[in-house]
Amino acid sequence: MDLSTLSYVYIFLAALLVGFTKTSVGGVGILAVLLMALAIPGKASPGVLLPMLIVADIFAVIYYRRHCNWGILLKLFPMTALGVVIGYFAVDLVPVAAFEKLIGATILFMLGFEILVPKRRDAPAALTAFVGVFAGISTMVANAAGPIFGIYLLQMGLPKKEFVGTRSWFFLLVNIFKIPFSANLGLITVETLKLNLLFVPVLFLGAYLGYKVLGMLNMAAFKWLIRAAVLVSAAKLLLP
């Protein structure tokens, strides 16, 4: 790929941010999507980002492998897989800009819901189905499922390590599931994979820094940082 020096800087920052968010607060992965789009305009951008997300997910799972809530995951993943399939067929039919506005508005609605409604570990089946399908479509069309899933987990009232561990396993499974769909759309190629290999050390550095930062946060600070990150993501999606 014929990239400028500035493009490599953008990819470096995106990789560092991806690694950091996967093992810490998260919710601002949409900023990595923006950086990658600046580095590589067009459809190739998601194809470069997806393998980076998977590598960072693997690092996060290694760090938090004992802290996954499998009950939540087993309820949510089938609906998310359905959403990925819907997103695969919708990606060329729905304007991405219009869909991003819908995602941003939904994130704001869910953020208000999370703050105002009492926490409960047994989410209503309808909410789980909605979050699963919408997260699947969002991750396939705009790589923007992180804030939606993050708000859902906050509503469950999970401790921070269980929150990050559940999120890590969820996105590792979802992103692996997306590979054949992205490859079929021509988003992942041998050339993009070669570029990914260059930035694996950067992903590891970001993941290590995120792990260290998470250990310094108390639960109250963690929750508000998640909310702030989600608000930033919603603003990015809604504002021109």
Image (tube, helix red, strand yellow):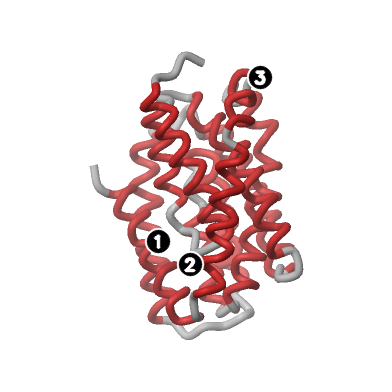
Quarter of the view holding residue 189: top right
Comes first in the chain, label 2 or label 1: 2
Front residue of 47 and 63: 63
Could you tell me the amino acid type at mark 1?
Val
Quarter of the view holding residue 10: top left
Could you tell me the amino acid type at mark 3?
Val
In this rendering, the label closer to the viewer, 1 or 3: 3
Q: Along the horizontal axis of the image, is 9 left or right of 80?
A: left
Front residue of 76 and 205: 205
Q: Along the horizontal axis of the image, is 143 left or right of 208?
A: left
Q: Residue at x 57, y 35 (%)?
A: 199
How many numbered marks appear? 3
Dot 3, crowdedness within 10 Å: few (<14), some or many (≥20)? Answer: few
Q: Is residue 45 above or below residue 203?
A: above
Name the residue that disc number 1 marks. 230
Could you tell me the amino acid type at mark 2?
Ile
Name the residue that disc number 2 marks. 151
Residue 71 seen by the camera: no
In this rendering, the label closer to the viewer, 3 or 2: 3
Name the residue that disc number 3 marks. 190
Q: Residue at x 68, y 56 (%)?
A: 77
Q: Secondary structure at mark 3?
A: helix
Comes first in the chain, label 1 or label 3: 3
Q: Residue at x 64, y 30 (%)?
A: 197
Task: Tell me where residue 238 appears, x and y as whole percent.
Answer: 29, 49
Comes first in the chain, label 3 or label 2: 2
